[in-house]
Image: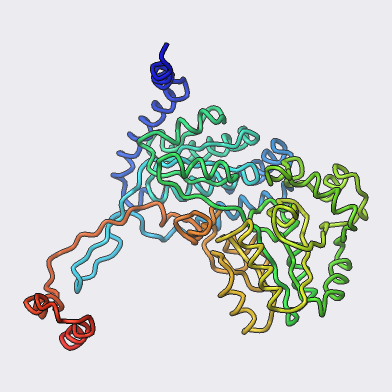
């Protein structure tokens, strides 16, 4: 048989995943049509009841997530579920997402909210219940049906979270099938749903390969890049406070938040004080041999990908895998580094209680190292600084290509928002063009609506005074045009 004919025959085969995905899509489309008719009061009632249900099940779902994924700390996952329910709800409860958003009589423009349509939500293993709740709440608030795609190692807890939310939504008179979930978590299933023509948007939170697949699916997507967060500790910083914050943040849920600190950068002149304070607060500096052993088990040198066996694990488990023996009370293992890049495996993102450590000869070199870390594996995401020198803070903020520059703030909780600052609480953190995202904002309900503009006739003075006959004169220069505009308007 001709190879072209064979290829065409293979391409025409419809898989069971495609058939079932199409059926789910049909249900979501009907739900979208019904949801589009709901008013703000109906919508808000659904969101509040779902948020309350998620909150009331915060402990159960956190324990399920830890039991199933075998990573993180269940008490910390409870706090994540609180952020995803109570804090997210408080952010969006008074936000207008239905009908007229604004009207300006002078300009004659009326802005009206319009749902996007069915949304597909990809869920990571690191935050399998909180991310489900978060994405469901912002989808419901914007009147968009949502289809959950769980991580294969977190199927049970993610589906239970979605089921509880769906049951609550139905009790609040939400449309049937406004929340669905994939029955299996396979590449075939994910691709089949991603490429459904009716999917309006993919909310992709997960590994780099999954986010790339979302962007290459042909469906609009909001994804997030990796977070290789550099932390610059300036000489003006309150050292015990800074290091206490870093430890609290990096050990939160065993480092599974993508915005957790990844590398400490300091100047040589006070390196001994910084090191002593870390050790005082039960952090352990690895020796050269121990660094090699941790590198070998933390990152695959060929692919540069984190070893899933160490993600979200405590120091003691990682140390056992690496064959080293840090002190029993060690909270974080710290590895001194000489450079940034693939040849330095610990200079990239590691979602575990491991920190890279850079000592630089001066401020300029320290800032350059932060930039290198930022661009190597965390462009557009988050950067952190501890300082009480406003000039240094301003310089750092201007130099970092990051959607969130956090000052004197724990990075994990600071980037997610709502705890140590007034950023929108979110489990999808935009990384801007540098991270191949459409925005640098913390994603919320406002990003899941189309704003259409009804524009009434208004006379525009610039046009009325526009002498277009003059523009036929080839000698009329740009400066003359500007002068004409400035004189008339």
Residue 171 in sight from this viewpoint: no
Q: Nearer the viewer, residue 154 or 357?
A: 357
Quarter of image, res 272: bottom right
Q: Residue at x 82, y 59 (%)?
A: 335
Residue 105: x %, y % from top left: 19, 71
In the image, 190: left or right of 130? left
Q: How is the image coloured?
A: rainbow
Which residue is pictured at 81% across the width and 45% down the height? 296
Q: Is residue 171 above or below residue 270?
A: above
Q: Quadrant of the C terminus?
A: bottom left
Q: Is residue 44 above or below residue 401?
A: above
Q: Residue furthest left?
A: 469
26 sits left or right of 395 in the view: left
57 lies left or right of 350: left
The picture quadrant where one finds residue 329 is bottom right
The quadrant of the image that shows the N terminus is top left
Of residues 78 and 198, the one drawn nearer to the viewer in this rendering: 198
Q: Position of residue 71 (x, y in %)?
A: 73, 43
Q: Toward which corner of the image does residue 176 lie, by quadrant? A: top left
Up the image or down, 158 lies above or below 324; here it is above
| Residue 1 can be seen, yes or no | yes
């Amino acid at each position: 048989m001709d190879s072209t004919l064979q290829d065409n025959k293979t391409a025409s085969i419809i898989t069971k995943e495609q058939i079932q995905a199409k059926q789910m899509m049909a249900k979501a489309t009907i739900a979208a049509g019904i949801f589009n008719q709901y008013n703000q009061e109906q919508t808000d009632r659904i969101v509040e009841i779902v948020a309350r249900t998620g909150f009331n099940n915060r402990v159960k779902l956190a324990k399920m997530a830890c039991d199933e994924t075998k990573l993180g700390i269940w008490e910390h996952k409870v706090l994540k579920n609180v952020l995803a329910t109570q804090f997210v709800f408080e952010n969006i409860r008074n936000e207008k997402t239905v009908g007229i958003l604004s009207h300006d009589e002078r300009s004659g423009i009326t802005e009206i909210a319009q749902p996007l349509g069915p949304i597909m939500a990809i869920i990571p293993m690191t935050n399998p219940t909180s991310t489900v709740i978060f994405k469901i709440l912002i989808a419901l608030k914007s009147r968009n049906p949502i289809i959950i795609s769980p991580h294969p190692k977190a199927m049970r807890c993610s589906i239970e979270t979605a089921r509880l939310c769906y049951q609550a939504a139905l009790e609040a008179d939400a449309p049937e099938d406004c929340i669905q979930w994939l029955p299996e978590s396979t590449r075939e299933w994910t691709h089949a749903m991603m490429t459904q023509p009716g999917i309006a948007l993919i909310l992709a939170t997960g590994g780099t390969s999954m986010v790339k697949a979302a962007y290459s699916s042909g469906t609009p997507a909001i994804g997030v890049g990796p977070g290789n967060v550099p932390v610059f500790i300036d000489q003006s910083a309150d050292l015990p406070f800074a290091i206490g914050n870093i430890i609290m943040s990096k050990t939160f849920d065993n480092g599974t938040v993508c915005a957790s600190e990844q590398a400490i950068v300091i100047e040589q002149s006070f390196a001994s004080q910084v090191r002593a304070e870390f050790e005082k607060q039960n952090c352990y500096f690895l020796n050269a041999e121990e660094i090699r052993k941790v590198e070998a088990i933390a990152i695959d040198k060929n692919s540069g990908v984190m070893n899933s066996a160490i993600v979200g694990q405590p120091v003691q488990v990682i140390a056992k895998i690496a064959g080293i023996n840090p002190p029993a009370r060690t909270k974080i293992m710290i590895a001194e580094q000489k450079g940034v890049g693939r040849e330095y495996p610990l200079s990239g993102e590691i979602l575990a209680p491991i920190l890279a450590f850079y000592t630089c000869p001066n401020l300029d070199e320290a800032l350059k190292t932060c930039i290198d870390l930022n661009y190597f594996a965390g462009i557009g995401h988050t950067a952190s600084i501890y300082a009480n020198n406003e000039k240094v803070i301003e310089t750092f903020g201007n130099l970092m290509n990051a959607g969130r520059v956090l000052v004197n703030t724990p990075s994990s909780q600071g980037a997610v928002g709502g705890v140590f600052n007034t950023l929108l609480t979110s489990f999808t953190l935009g990384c801007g063009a540098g991270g191949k995202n459409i925005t640098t904002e913390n994603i919320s309900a406002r990003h899941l609506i189309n704003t259409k503009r009804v524009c009434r006739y208004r006379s525009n003075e610039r046009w009325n005074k526009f002498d277009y006959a003059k523009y036929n004169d080839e000698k009329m220069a740009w400066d003359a045009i500007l002068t004409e505009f400035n004189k008339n308007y």
